[in-house]
């Protein structure tokens, strides 16, 4: 029984997969946190740009 436990502890099969799962979870977590921090500022600037964008003429002479 002791040998079986030691063998299981020393076995490294699948360790790379676990590493990738942990790294991916960290990247996703950091991305979500960054989005939560940046979102209010982007929203504020987008609202201030909206009225200016409405005044811009986007008509073209293409197809006339």
Image (spheres, grey):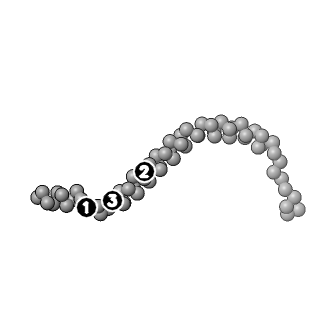
Label 1 SS: loop
Rounded to the nearest whole Å, what is the CA distance between mark 2 and mark 3?
15 Å
| Viewer-side label of 2, 3 | 3
Question: Dot 3, crowdedness within 10 Å: few (<14), some or many (≥20)?
Answer: few
Kindly identify the residue that appears in the image at 88 percent across and 62 percent down: 64
Instruction: Answer with mark 2 or mark 3, whichever residue precedes in sequence.
Output: 3
Residue receiving disc 3: 15
Question: Dot 2, crowdedness within 10 Å: few (<14), some or many (≥20)?
Answer: few
Q: Position of residue 49 (x, y in %)?
A: 73, 40
Residue 1 is left or right of residue 58, and the answer is: left
Rounded to the nearest whole Å, what is the CA distance between mark 2 and mark 1?
24 Å
Q: Position of residue 1 (x, y in %)?
A: 11, 58
Residue 27 is left or right of residue 14, and the answer is: right
Q: In the rendering, which numbered label is found on residue 11?
A: 1
Residue 8 is left or right of residue 48, and the answer is: left
Q: Relative to 32, does residue 16 appear above or below in the rendering?
A: below
Residue receiving disc 2: 25
Q: Position of residue 12 (x, y in %)?
A: 29, 61
Rounded to the nearest whole Å, what is the CA distance between mark 3 and mark 1?
9 Å
Instruction: Answer with mark 2 or mark 1, whichever residue precedes in sequence.
Output: 1
Q: Relative to 46, does residue 8 appear above or below in the rendering?
A: below
Q: Relative to 38, does residue 12 appear above or below in the rendering?
A: below
Kindly identify the residue that appears in the image at 58 percent across and 40 percent down: 38
| Viewer-side label of 2, 1 | 1
């Amino acid at each position: 029984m002791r040998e079986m436990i030691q063998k299981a502890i020393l076995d490294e099969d699948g360790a790379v997969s676990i590493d990738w799962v942990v790294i991916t979870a960290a990247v996703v977590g950091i991305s979500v946190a960054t989005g939560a921090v940046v979102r209010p500022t982007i929203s504020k600037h987008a609202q201030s740009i909206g009225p200016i964008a409405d005044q811009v003429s986007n008509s073209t002479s293409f197809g006339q």
